Image: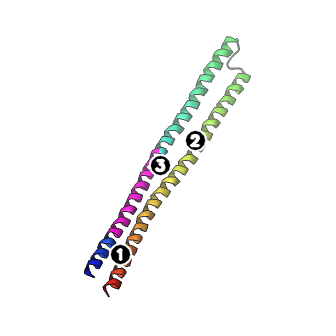
Amino acid sequence: MAYMQALMAVSTGISVMSAMQKGNAENTAFQMDAQQQELRLAQEKIIAAQRHNDRIAELDFNQSVNEAYFAFLGRDVSDASYKAFMRKNQETAYSDAKRSNYQSLLEQGQIRYARAQDLHRGAMAKQRSKIEAMNSLVTGMYNMSVTGV
């Protein structure tokens, strides 16, 4: 009988340790996923700034080309139609940049949410493993008491 109880004690110990290691491994995996989300967030911020800067640079380039073209045609850049044309180009460019920034903010929010989910899942995996370990311990102790009778 003592041999059987010793086997049950070892089995219970292994089961408890296995449940704890499983939870820790899952938590680590989710922590790594959360770190990836942080990297994606930083990358999204950089991409948004690049898109904004590219659109403003494109506007500047287009304005220079338009000024040169108007000068080539012999038109005055102080002309009302030229100013209206340039103002419309600016409005469009800044509207594009603004829309891009809003889109980036939405993407950043989704990334932050995914990161929070990963951290929560990791915490829940760790908590679940503790419950499984406790269940294994109680079941093992019960089986040992039943066998010992």
Q: Tell which of 17 and 76 is nearer to you.
A: 17
Question: What numbered label is drawn on residue 137?
Answer: 1
114 to the left or right of 8: right
Give the quarter of the image for residue 25.
bottom left
Q: Secondary structure at mark 2?
A: helix
Q: Residue at x 54, y 32 (%)?
A: 53
Q: Position of residue 121 (x, y in %)?
A: 47, 60
Q: Position of residue 46 (x, y in %)?
A: 49, 38
Q: Residue furthest right?
A: 81
Q: Secondary structure at mark 3?
A: helix
Q: Residue at x 38, y 66 (%)?
A: 19
Q: Is residue 4 above or below residue 104?
A: below
Mark 1 and mark 2: Cα distance apart in space: 54 Å
Indicate which disc, 1 or 3, sits on the residue closer to the N terminus. 3
5 to the left or right of 127: left
Kind of residue at disc 2: Asn
- State which quarter of the image contains the C terminus: bottom left
Asked whether residue 89 is drawn in magenta, I would say no
Q: Residue at x 34, y 79 (%)?
A: 141
Asked whether residue 15 is drawn in magenta, I would say yes
Kind of residue at disc 1: Leu
Question: What numbered label is drawn on residue 101?
Answer: 2
Q: From the image, tell me which residue sits under label 3.
A: 37
70 to the left or right of 117: right
Q: Tell which of 84 and 16 is nearer to you.
A: 16
Indicate which disc, 1 or 2, sits on the residue closer to the N terminus. 2
Write down the region rendered in magenta.
14-39
